Amino acid sequence: MKRVLFWLLAVTALIAAVPLSFMLLFAYAISSETSRTVYSRALSPDGMLEARVQFDDCGATCDFSRVVFIKRHGLGDEPSRSCRAFWAKGEEPVSLEWTGNRTLLVRHGFQASEVQDAPDHCGDVKVEAVRN
């Protein structure tokens, strides 16, 4: 009886493990397919900060958008090391211009309803988002 119970448990565990392993492999494949496109970069006048316009493409799970991040010059492009200064859904062009060491002008072509986030400051940097 113990032997039969052991085999039933083993077969049940195997049946449960196979779909779970496929789900984990699928989740890994989706997460590893993300690619980052940086459209433009702008260095602050004092060379301490860098702003960039980027899009992270994760396939069908992402909307098209443009995101502006500000970071210390020389750090990697990971969003966790950056401050998000602007985010809009769509594919309109975005241009960056530093008007001072701590003032960034973001020019864009988005309608107000497409802008998801446009703070007036990103850390100690003043951010001005202006529609073209």
Image: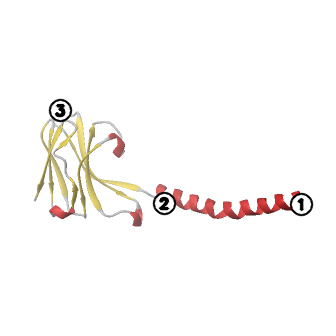
Three-letter residue code for mark 1: Met
Task: Residue 23: name its quadrant.
Answer: bottom right
Three-letter residue code for mark 2: Ile
- Marks 3 & 2, CB-CB < 8 Å contact: no
Q: Position of residue 36 (x, y in %)?
A: 36, 54
Q: Residues within 10 Å of mark 2 (few under 14, many from 20)?
A: some
Task: Look at 15% across and 36% down and name the residue there.
Answer: 102
Three-letter residue code for mark 3: Asp
Q: Which residue is mark 2?
A: 30
Q: Which residue is mark 1?
A: 1
Q: Position of residue 73 (x, y in %)?
A: 28, 36
Task: Residue 51: name its quadrant.
Answer: top left
| Distance between mark 3 and mark 1 Cα atoms | 79 Å
- Marks 3 & 1, CB-CB < 8 Å contact: no
Quarter of the figure that contains the N terminus: bottom right
Q: Is residue 125 above or below residue 84?
A: above
Task: Residue 70: name its quadrant.
Answer: top left
Q: Which mark is residue 46?
A: 3
